[in-house]
DNA sequence: CTGAAAGCGCTTACAG
DNA sequence: CTGAAAGCGCTTACAG
């Protein structure tokens, strides 16, 4: 393999100009078919590799996208966002972009430290994966960098974000439980923790209201503190016949808790989750849950950020992507 | 915020040359203290951001490192390498490099397609995380790109790789079981699947030989086929008193299988794992296992690849990083 | 201590 | 269809 073959080297060997080589290799007009083929052939033969950096220099674009994930969402038990990142990396690659993942530490979030890749102009824009503090977001927005929020949103109406359809997802799930004859239905989740959990709660609430099912204070069960750490689940006695959990991981914990108390799932209590992540099939019995459409969300957010990079004025607003019920064995038919 | 402030803009405002600004900002000699401070102050004031691309252009270095992960190792249940990637990303960032993750699809591996980031000179070198086919590796080595293998190695003695101390890890674990009075000890894993599993098996084997403990063909239990898909575990009847599993995930499966057959852990059978990943604490009882030192391995492999980028001739060979026993509740004392 | 010149490898806009 | 010139934003090597 030749070291560092440039367009000029190819041009020199063929007695043409490097402008012509550039056009040939990039598939642009202005080169005869014959010459183009000759150039491409020689390029392959000489082991030519395109130098993206030079193009970046010219265009002022790196063709890199930063993906910021708050450290909080990256524990050993939280593979969800890592899974998401995989989907993003694949889609970015298909668009000719590369992703640079940045785990934002709790300290950096609090002290509002911008990622090094921003300071060094190494990326053209950012996808923020997972809810960040309002202050951090505000600071970031002020830098005027193209930004897309993924899997969360805030109250700025003009922010571009891609979320899963939390509200209708849980609404559908709750309707399904009611349809099967359940009336005593609890919701498990801290509605003040993230916008997603709140929306999921509201979907549950809508379904309950619509069906005129009685609500009960004990039936709103907290699952985590303000820092996102899980807390012990307080199961009402007697327990409701069904639990709507804000995510599969909590459903997994709930099933253990119920089992310890001598209740079995789904015979005594039905349980549904959300996400269809690893915990859905780790739970015994396997959970009926909502499958988040990661691929679709990745596609949407990547094409959104690329459009914003190319034209900063474009706004897309909030886009929500439909989730899909996965029926498994954690729900009992009461009819 | 000013759009696109360059060193020239700063130089112009101060009536100096951009060479001086460059020296001042990069902390190089040849600028008076006073002028340096003035330049730095103005840079901050004007919202100057260093343009890495320009430096890359000059140096021919992107300050990016590609991390290749074979698709096989990235399922919903396999968060291990994603966890590893996080550690890598952090360490790379600390060294002023950015990681670009590339999931190598099964097809691309078979057809030996090089990653786009290679073809576009977007990275200065690669860390390959997880065993790849011999043919792919060979092709990659021929490109003369700086390469480090992480968590596996092959028989090329000059290849640079960082592995966990599989051999002595399992050796220690097996010694521990023997010390507690176990004599009927099985090994669970397909020794032909990866170099790590083979080494783990050999550590077990060494311990058994050293203690003169009887071996038994039935006590080598297969866990996966050639493609890495898990297969049903065949537990000998009567079962041994202890099982050494090649990883925590398989230990998790084994515990379920034993439970189904009416054996309880650790009362009837002791089980140890390897990795200390999510499955170690998902298993009931929690697994005694070997904790892989990811942080150390990430540090070693990143500084290795950076050294190779700066000087291609440097060779490091195989470096193995010690793992640590984590004692939990899956082993019974038979004495 | 300070800076003019050249160059990294490409592309754009324009001339022929 | 083909190419000379200029420039993207820095840094290196050298001159003063």
Image (cartoon, coloured by chain):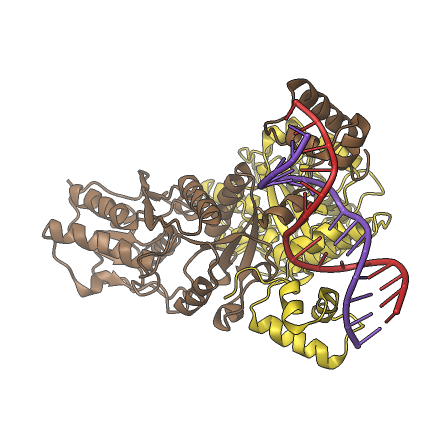
Chain colours: A brown, B yellow, C purple, D red
Residue A115 occupies quadrant: bottom right
Q: Is residue A261 visible?
A: no
* In front of the other: D5 or B197: D5
Residue drawn at the location 47% of the way across and 58% of the way down: A73
Give the percent coordinates (x, y) of residue A197.
31, 57
Q: Is residue B326 left or right of residue B33?
A: left
Q: Is residue A254 left or right of residue A87?
A: left
Give the percent coordinates (x, y) of residue B124.
72, 47
Give the percent coordinates (x, y) of residue A326.
33, 38
* In front of the other: A22 or A76: A22
Residue drawn at the location 28% of the way across and 54% of the way down: A200
Quarter of the image for the C terminus of chain B: give it: bottom right
Q: Is residue B157 left or right of residue A59?
A: right
Q: Is residue B301 visible?
A: yes
* In front of the other: B126 or B245: B126
Residue extending furthest toward the bottom: B34
């Amino acid at each position: 393999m030749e070291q560092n073959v440039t367009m000029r080297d190819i041009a020199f060997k063929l007695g043409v100009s490097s402008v012509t080589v550039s056009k040939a290799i990039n598939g642009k007009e202005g080169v005869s078919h014959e010459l183009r083929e000759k150039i491409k052939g020689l390029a392959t033969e000489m082991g030519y590799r395109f130098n993206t950096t030079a193009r970046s220099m010219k265009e002022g674009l790196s063709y890199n996208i930063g993906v910021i994930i708050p450290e909080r969402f990256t524990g050993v038990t939280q593979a969800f966002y890592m899974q998401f990142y995989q989907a993003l990396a694949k889609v970015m690659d298909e668009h000719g972009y590369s992703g640079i993942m940045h785990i934002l530490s709790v300290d950096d979030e609090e002290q509002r430290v911008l990622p090094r890749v921003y300071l060094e102009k190494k990326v053209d824009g950012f996808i923020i994966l997972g809810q960040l503090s309002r202050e951090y977001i505000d600071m970031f927005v002020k830098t005027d960098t193209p930004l897309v929020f993924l899997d969360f949103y805030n109250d700025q109406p003009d922010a571009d974000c891609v979320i899963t359809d939390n509200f209708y997802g849980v609404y559908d799930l709750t309707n399904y439980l009611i349809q099967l004859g359940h009336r005593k239905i609890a919701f498990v989740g801290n509605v003040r923790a993230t916008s997603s959990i709140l929306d999921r709660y509201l979907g549950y609430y809508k379904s309950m209201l619509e069906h005129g099912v009685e609500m009960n204070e004990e039936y709103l069960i907290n699952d985590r503190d303000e820092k996102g750490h899980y807390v012990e689940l307080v199961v009402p006695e007697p327990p409701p016949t069904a639990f709507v959990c804000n995510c599969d991981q909590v459903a997994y914990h709930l099933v253990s808790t119920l089992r310890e108390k001598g209740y079995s799932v789904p015979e005594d209590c039905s349980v549904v989750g959300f996400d269809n992540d690893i915990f859905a099939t780790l739970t015994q019995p396997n959970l009926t849950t909502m499958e988040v459409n990661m691929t679709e969300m990745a596609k949407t957010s990547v094409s959104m950020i690329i459009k914003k990079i190319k034209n900063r004025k474009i706004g897309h607003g909030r886009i929500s992507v439909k989730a899909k019920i996965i029926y498994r064995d954690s729900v009992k038919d009461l009819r």
